[in-house]
Amino acid sequence: MEWGMKNRFSRIMNAQSGNCVMLAVDHGYFQGPTTGLENLGKTVEPLLPYADALMITRGALRNWIPAEMNKPIVLRVSGGQSILKELSNEIITTSIEDAIRINASAITCSVFVGSENEKETIGNLARIVNEGETYGIPVLAVTAVGKEMVRDARYLGLACRICVEMGAHMVKTYYCQDFPKIVKACGNIPVVIAGGKKIEEKAALEMAYNAIQDGAAGVDMGRNVFQSDNPVGMMKAVQAIVHEKATVAKALKIYKPSAK
Ligand code: R5P
């Protein structure tokens, strides 16, 4: 890895654990004012101290996040569709020049393997990897967000491996049974998990714990943090799992000291 890319990458990954707790707040790019993100700045501010990086769009960043903030930005640069239409119909929305202007530590786009626009979204990833390699900016590929896809190790492994072969420097996917197969399919490329739809806190922490045990390099969670009844508690609990390999029981106590 070239020096600049290595430097940006090391801002995202925690130096001690080698893992990462990324806070995803990019949901509005396809689903509008998501519950919990209506006033994005107010939601994010208390959570930031516990995040290693923030995944966000340029519009949300400029609107709601003060430039004095010092956390690395993982900038979503794809979009062009909404939940009302075919999700895979994405284009690259943000130029590499704007990503540099924003001082992004990484750029990211979605890849919809097996969807209507598979070729275009794989092409989007290849394009931003080319741009990232030119300017030393790592690329996070987000896979398997297509709603109709089966989330098993066979499919997710296929999707993740394609992203790795296209040159992604980091991959984000869902946790599933046989997750180690996905990690193996990605070789040296770190795999982080998305949280998915809001579930019960205990189940979300179990998922994060199992993912770390199975070789994930961290989480890129959104709704299971900011839609929780105690978002700061959830961030701290997830952080303990990802960086300190805390048990679910310990994490639950961190999330809510009164929880069983
Ligand atoms: C997916 O396309 C986006 O990056 C999502 O905003 C992200 O995956 C959401 O994280 P979560 O599923 O944990 O809310």
Image: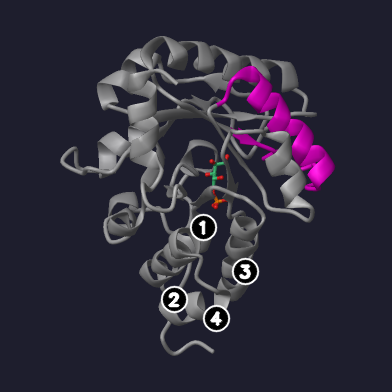
Three-letter amino acid code at the position of disc 3: Glu
Disc ID at residue 223: 1
Instruction: Report which residue position mark 4 lands on.
Output: 249
| Residue found 74% across the figure and 54% down from its top | 176
Q: Earlier in the sequence, mark 2 or mark 3?
A: 3
Element type at mark 1: helix
Q: Earlier in the sequence, mark 4 or mark 2?
A: 4
Q: Is residue 245 left or right of residue 215?
A: left
Instruction: Report which residue position mark 3 lands on.
Output: 206
Three-letter amino acid code at the position of disc 1: Arg
| Above or below, comparing residue 178 to residue 157 in the picture | below
- Distance from the alpha carbon under mark 2 to that under mark 1: 15 Å
Disc ID at residue 255: 2
| Above or below, comparing residue 207 to residue 247 in the picture | above
Element type at mark 2: helix
Nearer to me, 19 or 87: 19
